[in-house]
């Protein structure tokens, strides 16, 4: 029975609250905190209506280590779940270190002024977390998160050596808007408008945004254009998967999405630097976020499925083998259960499972860890129980 403090009452936060409450045997006490108390109040009411369960709520500015420390001392959680934005990772990690509290997040640290994401600054906490006797679990969403666990599972049960990995992320959902993003628009657009990057023979190879395209036939969805992007889980997987020679990440985008994005980029709306407008300063991409539909409101309108998985090739008992491990999630089913579309659902469920692994002691080790560094089996079992069942196909010829 564990006490948890969840920070960030956004789209993903909503799913995490639902799943924590559904797992009351593990999570005996839940506090939800966010920048705006009214965001928390909506979910507090939802938990009463849906499950008759009361959760505590609190206001916190997670950019302030002092405010976080004060809140953590008051709540005394066993683990803090950071479901706010990647900008807050370091302040929340610091507050957890000061209060000696376990930490979990779903995305690696990004500085608001540089559209660049890497684990360096979070990995730098490893020794201090170890000395403090606490654990940080990094990237417990779907990708990163489940994709890392899929790789660890394949490595453990299906391969002696994995040579290549392609992570394939398809959102086959349609929300009916000309243009909207399925999670925080600022984070999403920064990610997809950046240069692509993949790793081969020990080196990172940079590509222009959307330069490399392939068509993949996604089970239960169909053929979709898929574009090579840089994605953060590759940084840790290249360190932890034995014998790896190449790893790439592909995400599907429709033509309309790409045309809108190109146009917004061309007129400067994806800019992350402040500009002067009518005597006040605005950051274009933040203003764009204000104009776009809130991802939290997409759930009801979105129909279709997501399919995220991993194709690995390598050797087993001296023979070349290839496996495809994936999950399919239905937007409408996710909405029925949690009032959220599948992109939030597929992130929020693994965040809860990661916390469950820690609170039940199945994944518990002092220091800062990525998902593939733990035994994948108990996590894979939970995916099947908690709404994200997986499938494996043998693609070996
Ligand atoms: P949202 O923008 O919907 O939610 C973020 C919430 O964080 C907001 O509701 C906001 O609260 C809160 N917040 C922002 N700044 C602060 C602050 N300074 N202090 C306290 N609270 C703050 O984003 P999502 O829910 O879509 O995404 C949440 C996280 O999940 C992100 O880090 C994202 O990168 C990650 N993610 C990971 C994925 C994965 O597969 N690994 C996939 C998708 C997302 P308020 O409403 O109170 O202002």
Image: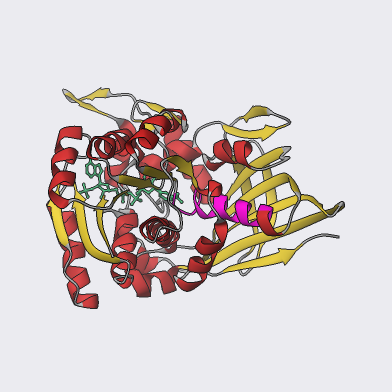
**Viewer-proximal residue, 168 or 157?**
157
Coloured how?
A: secondary structure
Question: What percent of the width, then of the height, locates residue 138?
Answer: 43, 44
Q: Position of residue 145 (x, y in %)?
A: 49, 51
Residue in the image at 35% along x and 61% along y: 298
| Magenta-highlighted residues | 140-155
The N terminus appears in which quarter of the rendering? bottom left
Q: Is residue 230 visible?
A: no
Residue 209 at x, y percent in the picture: 57, 34
Identity of the residue drawn at 39% across and 41% down: 187
Where is residue 314? Give x, y as percent.
Answer: 78, 49
Which quadrant is home to the C terminus?
bottom right
Compare residues 87 and 132 and report the one nearer the observer.
132
What is the tally of numbered marks visible in this picture?
A: 0
Q: Is residue 145 magenta?
A: yes
Query: Image point 34% across, 62% down: which residue?
Result: 15
Q: Quadrant of residue 195?
A: top right
Residue 26 is covered by the magenta coloring: no
**Residue in front for this viewpoint, 180 or 106:** 106
Using the rendered view, name the quadrant where residue 98 is placed: top left
The correct choice, above or below, for 380 with respect to 282 in the image is below
Q: Nearer the viewer, residue 230 or 313?
A: 313
């Amino acid at each position: 029975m564990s006490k948890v403090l969840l920070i960030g009452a956004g789209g993903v936060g909503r799913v995490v609250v639902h799943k924590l409450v559904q797992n009351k045997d593990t999570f005996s006490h839940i506090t939800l905190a966010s920048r705006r108390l009214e965001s928390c109040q909506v979910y507090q009411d939802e938990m009463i209506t849906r499950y008759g369960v009361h959760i505590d709520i609190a206001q916190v500015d997670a950019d302030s280590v002092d405010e976080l420390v004060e809140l953590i001392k008051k709540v005394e959680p066993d683990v803090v779940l950071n479901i706010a934005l990647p900008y807050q990772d370091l302040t929340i990690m610091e507050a957890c270190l000061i209060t000696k509290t376990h930490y979990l997040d779903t995305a690696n640290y990004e500085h608001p002024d540089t559209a660049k994401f890497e684990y360096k600054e979070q990995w730098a906490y490893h020794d201090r977390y170890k000395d403090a006797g606490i654990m940080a679990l990094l990237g417990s969403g779907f990708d990163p998160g489940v994709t890392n666990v899929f790789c660890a599972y394949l490595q453990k049960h299906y391969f002696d050596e994995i040579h290549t990995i392609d992570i394939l992320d398809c959102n086959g959902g349609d929300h009916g808007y000309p243009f909207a993003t399925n999670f925080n628009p600022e984070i999403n657009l920064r990610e997809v408008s950046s240069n692509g990057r993949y790793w081969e023979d020990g080196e990172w190879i940079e590509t222009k945004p959307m330069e490399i395209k392939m068509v993949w036939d996604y089970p239960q969805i169909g053929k979709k254009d898929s574009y090579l992007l840089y994605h953060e889980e590759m940084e840790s997987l290249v360190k932890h998967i034995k014998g790896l020679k190449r790893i790439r990440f592909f995400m599907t985008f429709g033509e309309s999405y790409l045309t809108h994005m190109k146009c917004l980029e061309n007129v400067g709306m994806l800019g992350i630097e402040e500009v002067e407008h009518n005597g006040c300063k605005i950051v274009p991409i933040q203003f764009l976020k204000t104009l776009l539909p809130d991802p939290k409101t997409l759930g009801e309108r979105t129909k279709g499925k997501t399919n995220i998985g991993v194709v690995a090739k390598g050797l087993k008992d001296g023979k070349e083998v290839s496996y495809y491990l994936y999950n399919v999630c239905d937007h409408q089913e996710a909405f029925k259960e949690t009032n959220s579309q599948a992109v939030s659902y597929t992130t929020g469920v693994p965040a809860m499972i990661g916390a469950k692994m820690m609170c039940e002691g199945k994944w518990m080790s002092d220091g800062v860890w990525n998902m593939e560094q733990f035994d994948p089996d108990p996590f894979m079992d939970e995916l099947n129980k908690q709404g994200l069942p997986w499938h494996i196909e043998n693609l070996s010829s």
